[in-house]
């Protein structure tokens, strides 16, 4: 089945199960572990456990309650943009099964921040930590990008626990140029300034690509240490095809995720950890307890999964929670 179609059909099935008598209870019983010893304090927040779902899976915040039943300690919704946009033409999601990988060129397809807010208002689970991943619309120039981040930040502020600034997706033309020091500093400093006017402090994190140069990583460390940034998400998908070159689908454009990005993501994490004391969420290629433990050993405070979750199924979450606590 087409991967994107499968994604929506599986989530529709899980939604149906949750509407059945005892359906949500059944999912929690099978997949979720709730123990006080799994709780951790980071970013001024109490996480039920340190295993989260990365952005891109629930782009519109439609499935937070369902996904929370599968055992996640936190769920990052988005990437959301100020205005609805369809994303890139189909097909735009590809399974590289032998390599346990995905290539996606979704292009920030989403229903817009206002639609997400309506969905988040309906969330019943008050224990799950929700992160809001914000980006810019495709037709917004880089010169005006800061305005899109401001809109997403201000509108979403009452409905999420933390924010992630996404300037690292390879599927919005020119977006990664915003990772350069000057435009990135401007975006972060603006959001930090806006936060000072809010009654409740919400952490702001930055999601970065695994394809940055050493100089760019040094700039990221500087920004993390000299702005009000609270943490980093290491890392997004890669454009590198070296580890999947033998697969015919490697010629498809887009970001590569899953097992082949694990090493690159770990290298970025290992480089940045000694350079900042800020919270780091490690994401990229986690498919087993051993993978998760290595992320933590290299300095990740929290971890997120996406492609590993797709391939291994919801049972992976329970294994990870038990294996790293």
Image: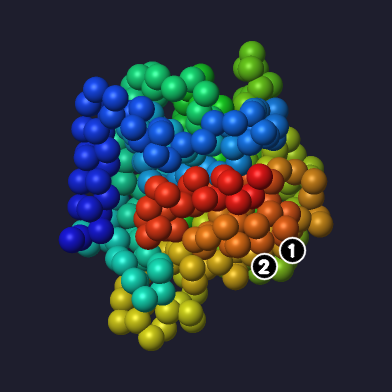
Residue at 55 percent of width and 40 percent of height = 164
Left or right, residue 117 beside residue 126: left
Q: Nearest the camera: 75 or 205? A: 75
**Mark 1, secondary structure of its residue:** helix
Say which quadrant the C terminus sits in.
Answer: top right
Few, some or many residues within 10 Å of mark 2 (<14, 14–19, 20+): few
**Is residue 192 in view from this perspective?**
no
Q: Which mark is residue 221?
A: none
Q: Which mark is residue 271?
A: 1
Residue 2, horizontal then vertical, whole percent: 20, 60
The image quarter in which residue 254 lies: bottom left
Residue 136, horizontal then vertical, whole percent: 44, 43
Residue at 24 percent of width and 22 percent of height = 21
Circles 1 and 2 in contact, beta carbons < 8 Å: yes
Residue at 59 percent of width and 62 percent of height = 291
**Alpha carbon of mark 1 to alpha carbon of mark 2: how far?**
6 Å
Left or right, residue 170 beside residue 213: left
Number of marks drawn: 2
**Is residue 223 in view from this perspective?**
yes
The image quarter in which residue 124 lies: top left
**Mark 2, secondary structure of its residue:** helix
Residue 122, horizontal then vertical, whole percent: 35, 19
Q: Nearest the camera: 211 or 38? A: 38
Residue at 42 percent of width and 40 percent of height = 31
Few, some or many residues within 10 Å of mark 1 (<14, 14–19, 20+): some
Q: Is residue 51 above or below residue 18?
A: below
Q: Which residue is mark 2?
A: 267
Q: Nearest the camera: 126 or 131? A: 126
Q: Is residue 100 above or below residue 314?
A: below
Q: Which residue is situated farthest in the top direction here?
A: 199
Residue 112, horizontal then vertical, whole percent: 34, 34
Say which quadrant the N terminus sits in.
Answer: bottom left
């Amino acid at each position: 089945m087409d991967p994107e179609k499968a994604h929506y059909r599986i989530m529709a099935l899980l939604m149906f199960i949750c509407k059945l008598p005892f359906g949500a209870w059944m999912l929690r019983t099978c997949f979720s572990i709730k123990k006080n010893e799994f709780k951790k304090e980071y970013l001024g927040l109490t996480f039920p456990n340190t295993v989260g779902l990365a952005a891109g899976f629930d782009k519109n915040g439609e499935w937070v309650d369902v996904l929370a039943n599968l055992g996640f300690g936190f769920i990052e919704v988005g990437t959301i943009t100020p205005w609805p946009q369809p994303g890139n033409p189909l097909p735009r999601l590809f399974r590289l099964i032998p390599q346990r990988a995905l290539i996606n060129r979704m292009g920030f397809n989403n229903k817009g921040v206002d639609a997400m807010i309506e969905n988040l208002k309906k969330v019943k689970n008050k224990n799950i930590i929700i992160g809001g991943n914000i980006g810019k619309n495709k037709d917004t120039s880089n010169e005006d990008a800061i305005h899109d981040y401001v809109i997403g930040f201000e509108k979403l502020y009452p409905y999420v626990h933390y924010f992630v600034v996404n300037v690292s997706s390879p599927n919005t033309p020119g977006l990664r140029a915003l990772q350069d020091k000057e435009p990135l500093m401007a975006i972060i400093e603006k959001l930090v300034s806006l936060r000072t006017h809010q009654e409740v402090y919400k952490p702001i994190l930055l999601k970065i690509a695994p394809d940055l140069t050493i100089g760019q990583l040094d700039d990221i460390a500087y920004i993390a240490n000299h702005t009000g940034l609270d943490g980093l998400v290491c890392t997004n998908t890669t454009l590198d095809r070296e580890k999947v070159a033998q697969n015919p689908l490697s010629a498809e454009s887009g970001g590569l995720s899953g097992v082949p990005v694990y090493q690159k993501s770990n290298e970025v994490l290992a480089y940045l950890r000694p350079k900042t004391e800020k919270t780091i969420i490690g994401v990229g290629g986690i498919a087993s307890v051993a993978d998760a433990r290595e992320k933590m050993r290299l300095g990740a405070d929290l971890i997120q999964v996406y492609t590993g979750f797709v391939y291994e199924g919801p049972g992976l979450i329970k294994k990870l929670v038990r294996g790293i606590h």
